[in-house]
Amino acid sequence: MGSTNEFYAGEEFNLDSKWLVDPKLLLVGPKIGEGAHAKVYEGKFKNQNVAIKIVHKGETPEEIAKAESRFVREVAMLSRVQHKNLVKFIGACKEPVMVVVTELLAGGTLKKYLVDIRPNCLDMKVAIGFALDIARAMECLHSHGIIHRDLKPENLLLTADRKNVKLADFGLAREETLTEMMTAETGTYRWMAPELYSTVTLRQGEKKHYNHKVDAYSFAIVLWELVHNKLPFEGMSNLQAAYAAAFKVNSYSIKESFTST
């Protein structure tokens, strides 16, 4: 396989043939997840249970270009980095649709698991075990110079026995050496570091500069959620949560400022 830099230089789909998946061999089943940029289905590949992520291509040339760029980045990183706490990459294809195939984690998302047991909390040993799994996954990515940028319970998948967690969804990941190419407002506000979305100090057209510490911030939010099993910034919209983190104000002040306008 070519280097990651080759992927970024021309955003070309230069995947090693061993990772190429024949779409005719994919059996797509029920939908198990949906995000802003893709839908995920349970499926089969060569009699193996898999998760099939079908990327939204978009309609305008700009949307199509962005979708293809995200797809190529995700495939490049999934095929390059392997770890027991990262979802296992099986393969991908770009035509007739952009598809990423990974192992199927039967335990579902950490988000769903936490919601299902509320208002109860996780056993502390379980919470710590999950936190360690997440930390190991992030350490692996960061050691390869990769920033995930979208760490949240929805992108953390549980094994069938619900004893371990694996990190998924590399659609927003970038190499740390390429932060000059990064733009603001990436990921999900409630778990995002303020430097990812705060554009107050940016001139028009200026790009964001940040590093792997944005993942450390998201990890801290997830860790709090594992311990308390509450939604971060509960009672606030995503925009209010972003405002609270960026300007370090309490929830009462935020609600007052938003309702008075």
Image (cartoon, grey):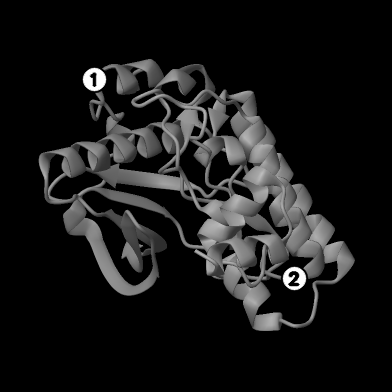
Q: Which mark is nearer the camera, 1 or 2? A: 2
Give above or below for 128 relative to 151: below
Pointer 1 residue: 10
Task: Please provide percent x and percent y for residue 142.
Answer: 63, 29
Pointer 2 residue: 229
Between the C-alphas of marks 1 and 2, the distance is: 43 Å
Which residue is located at x 80 percent, y 72 percent? Answer: 122
Give above or below for 39 relative to 90: below
Estimate how packed mark 2 is, as few (under 14), some (14 to 19) or many (20 or more) residues with alpha carbons within 10 Å: many
Q: Amino acid at mark 1?
A: Gly
Q: Is residue 19 left or right of residue 57?
A: right
Q: Foreground residue, 157 or 148?
A: 148
Task: Please provide percent x and percent y for residue 80.
Answer: 46, 30
Task: Please provide percent x and percent y for residue 252.
Answer: 71, 66
Q: Is residue 35 left or right of residue 211?
A: left
- Find residue 17 and report its image quarter: top left
Q: Foreground residue, 225 or 41?
A: 225
- Using the rendered image of the protein, determine whether residue 80 is visible from the camera's viewpoint: yes
Q: Amino acid at mark 2?
A: Asn
- Find residue 136 and report its image quarter: top right
Q: Is residue 164 left or right of residue 87?
A: right
Q: Foreground residue, 253 or 240?
A: 253
Q: Foreground residue, 50 or 31?
A: 31
Task: Please provide percent x and percent y for residue 163.
Answer: 73, 65
Give above or below for 96 relative to 12: below
Secondary element at image label 2: loop
